[in-house]
Amino acid sequence: MENLVSIAKILNFHGIKGEARVGFTKGHEGQIATLKKVFAGSARHELNVQSVRFHKNFAIIKFAEFNSIDELLEFKGENLYVPKVTVVKTLEEDEFLVEDLVGMQVFDDKDDLVGEVQSVGVSAANDILCIKPENPDYEQFLIPFVKELVPVVDVAKGKIIIKPIEGLLE
């Protein structure tokens, strides 16, 4: 069951009938609302979605497999996964999966190789590209992942272009 991506996490139970309070990334309500089947945790237990409703900033999901708190408790804290192809179909033209950025080559606006994306971090304001530089004098560069600094992401070519500002790559 590889080629799965995490889209949400079971945070807790909701009520006594086996409903799960699920956290997800804001803006993905449409994906969550249309779920029919997910895989939970590292063991990838298949769960069938009976219903989804939204409460505050969470989804309340009723899975067919759970009818009580006790049945759901072992899944508390587990990530929920769906096939990557399911998520990719819902992406807009300029959207992509964060995991697809890892390993991409990063160039400056003069087409000079800067380095390679090692990971993508999260901050309160925006995501952060963690770049392993080509120049061994530097340990890593942290680039805020905002359109002004990262104007081009070409997943098909595996290439990211950044617009360096003074001090950013030093």
Image (spheres, helix red, strand yellow):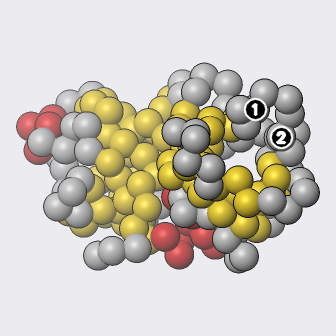
Q: Residue at x 66, y 63 (%)?
A: 105
Instruction: Give neighbour class at mark 2: few <14, some 14-19, many 20+ (Cα, 10 Å).
Output: some
The type of residue carrying mark 2 is: Pro
| Residue 97 x %, y % | 59, 59
The disc label shown at residue 10, or none: none
Residues marked 2 and 1 touching at CB (< 8 Å): yes
| Residue 161 x %, y % | 80, 56
Q: Secondary structure at mark 1?
A: loop
| Residue 148 x %, y % | 87, 39
Q: Secondary structure at mark 2?
A: loop
Give the quadrant of residue 31. bottom right
Residue topped by disc 1: 168
Q: Residue at x 86, y 45 (%)?
A: 163
Q: Residue at x 46, y 52 (%)?
A: 7
Residue topped by disc 2: 164
Q: Residue at x 53, y 71 (%)?
A: 86
For the residues labelled 2 and 1, the Cα–Cα distance comes to 6 Å
Q: Residue furthest front?
A: 137
The type of residue carrying mark 1 is: Leu
Q: Is residue 128 left or right of residue 94?
A: left
